[in-house]
């Protein structure tokens, strides 16, 4: 299964850099990795990413809060990934993004909370949860998360934002 998973990652990487036809190869490689060993959560995570990458931009997300077949396939793959590997933080983040799009903020918040529990020093997790909280009208909680994101970030640009934020 490893060779197929690494092949999928290679195709996904090259697809990201402009070779869009490689995404279909990444999808096929993920499916082969799963067929060989269906108990590896990471394979399902990359399967979901590959599904998203093979869908044309116009069809990537449903125009309403009703999930498309691709949304269902991605959610199923992320669910399986997390069932097999409950510490797979990127799968929580990706599933939360789908839930936000499908207008299920409570489910998204649950995923962000779990991801933060597993990786409490990740500034991006706090930033995303803060945005969700702000959109839900929970401004005080959002400010606390934005503050935590700034504190946890080692990036130079975030440091400048932190300095600005502390002056206010």
Image (cartoon, helix red, strand yellow):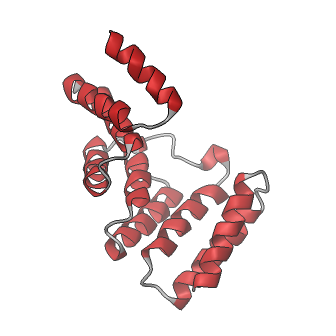
User: Looking at the figure, which quarter contains the C terminus?
Assistant: top left
Identity of the residue furthest to the top in this view: 168
Q: Nearer the viewer, residue 118 or 68?
A: 118
- Based on the displayed image, in which of its 4 quarters is residue 49 positioned? bottom right
- Answer with the quarter of the image where residue 109 lies: top left
The residue at 40%/18% (across/down) is: 163
For the question of whether residue 86 can be seen, the reply is yes
Q: Position of residue 154 (x, y in %)?
A: 44, 37
| Along the line of sight, the residue nearer the viewer: 95 or 60 | 95
Q: Is residue 36 above or below residue 109?
A: below
Image location of residue 18, percent across then percent down: 78, 51
Please provide percent x and percent y for residue 21: 78, 61
| In this view, 109 is above or below 131 | below
- Give residue 133's position: percent from left, percent from top: 28, 32
As drawn, the residue found furthest toward the bottom would be: 36
- The quadrant of the image that shows the N terminus is bottom right
Q: Visible in this render: residue 28?
A: no
Along the viewing direction, whichever of 6 and 132 lies nearer the viewer: 6
- Judge from the rendering whether residue 92 lies leftward or rightward of residue 62; answer left or right: left
Q: Is residue 101 left or right of residue 54?
A: left
How many numbered marks have been drawn onto this rendered protein structure? 0
Query: What residue sits 57% from the left and 82% below the top?
Result: 33
Identify which residue, 117 or 68, lies in the foreground: 117
Left-right relation of 59 to 142: right
Q: Residue at x 65, y 71 (%)?
A: 8
Considering only vertical position in the picture, is 89 above or below 58?
A: below
**Residue at position x 41%, y 37% from top?**
153
């Amino acid at each position: 299964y490893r060779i197929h998973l690494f092949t999928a990652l290679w195709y996904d990487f090259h697809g990201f850099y402009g070779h869009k036809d490689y995404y279909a190869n990444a999808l096929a490689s993920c499916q082969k990795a799963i067929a060989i060993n269906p108990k590896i959560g990471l394979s399902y995570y990359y399967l979901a990413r590959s599904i998203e990458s093979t869908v044309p931009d116009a069809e990537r997300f449903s125009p309403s809060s009703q999930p498309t077949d691709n949304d269902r396939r991605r959610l199923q793959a992320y669910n399986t990934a997390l069932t097999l590997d409950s510490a797979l933080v990127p799968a929580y983040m990706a599933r939360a993004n789908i839930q936000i799009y499908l207008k299920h903020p409570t489910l998204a918040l649950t995923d962000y909370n779990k991801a933060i529990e597993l990786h409490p020093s990740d500034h991006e997790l706090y930033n995303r949860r803060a945005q969700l909280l702000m959109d839900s009208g929970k401004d005080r909680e959002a400010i606390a998360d934005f503050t935590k994101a700034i504190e946890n970030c080692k990036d130079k640009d975030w440091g400048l934002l932190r300095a600005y934020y502390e002056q206010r």
